[in-house]
Amino acid sequence: MSVFDGWKVTSPYGYRSDPFTGSQVFHTGIDLVKYHKYPIPAFVGGVVLFAGEGVAGTGFGGYGNVVALRDDAGYVHCYCHLDSVAAAKGQTLSKGDIVGNQGTTGRSTGSHLHYEVRAKDAPSYGYGSHVDPGEYLESIQTLPTEEDEDNMAIKAENWFWKQAYNILGKAYNEGKIDWQWCQKVLDRTLSAWEYAHVLAVIEARTKGVDVDSENPAAVGPDQRGK
């Protein structure tokens, strides 16, 4: 079983045709896909060194929104092109904790995760010291069991319910919505329609978009970051 089982690999580590220019270039990471805005779990634990937009000069220019964490061996794991980040610099994460959401920020042709592993953390967060991500993960960990995969999925799902309750609970405390919304989140009984709309609220709030406080599920298509 591969360390990336369950992911669609759209571009492996190594030489490839650049999607923008068509020329042969070395792809320094591996491109992985679940679905747009999928909560990305950390493949290993570590300390977050960088969380935010990768601008020129940072070692993440063109990478869009990035979370980079250093593992116990000093290798830097880069989660790139994220739609949004869910970690902060200095935070310690465990394997399976959510780093952010799959996206297409920066120099990207579509929603995916560019996952890159670097052998050192300086300068520029180890830019240019990349190694094969799959080979590295296989060298430091046993392959995930079904229980590991289930736990990672649970953490991703729990992240959604926590964010939903934080948003809806605040709205309830301010007298803006009925308790039934919060109760449905506590009981995890949202309908598919309600789930989709509450997810849209979470996405809008993470982007700083203020939504209709009288109906926290009412978010226009132009506010969903589509």
Image: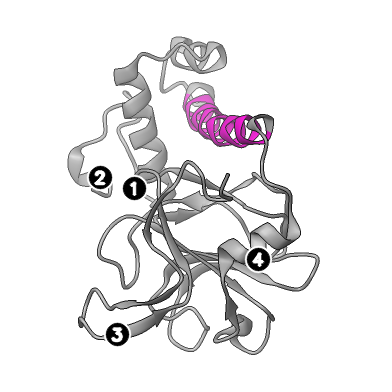
Q: Is residue 150 magenta?
A: yes
Nearest the camera: 182 or 41? Answer: 41
Q: Position of residue 4 (x, y in %)?
A: 52, 50
Nearest the camera: 85 or 18? Answer: 18
The type of residue carrying mark 1 is Val
Q: Is residue 163 magenta?
A: yes
Question: Residues at badges 4 and 2 in contact (C-beta under 8 Å)?
Answer: no
The type of residue carrying mark 2 is Gln
- Label disc, if present, on residue 136 of the rendered structure: 4
Q: In the shown orientation, is residue 103 left or right of residue 96?
A: left
Q: In the shown orientation, is residue 126 left or right of residue 198?
A: right
Please report the bounds of the magenta region as a residue range: 148-171
Q: State which tag comes first along the sequence, 4 or 1.
A: 4
Question: Residues at badges 1 and 2 in contact (C-beta under 8 Å)?
Answer: yes
Helix, strand or loop at label 2? It is helix
The type of residue carrying mark 4 is Tyr
- Label disc, if present, on residue 223 of the rendered structure: 2
Which residue is at a point 59% across and 86% down the rendered structure image? Answer: 124
Q: Position of residue 203 (x, y in %)?
A: 38, 43
Q: Quadrant of the N terminus?
A: top right
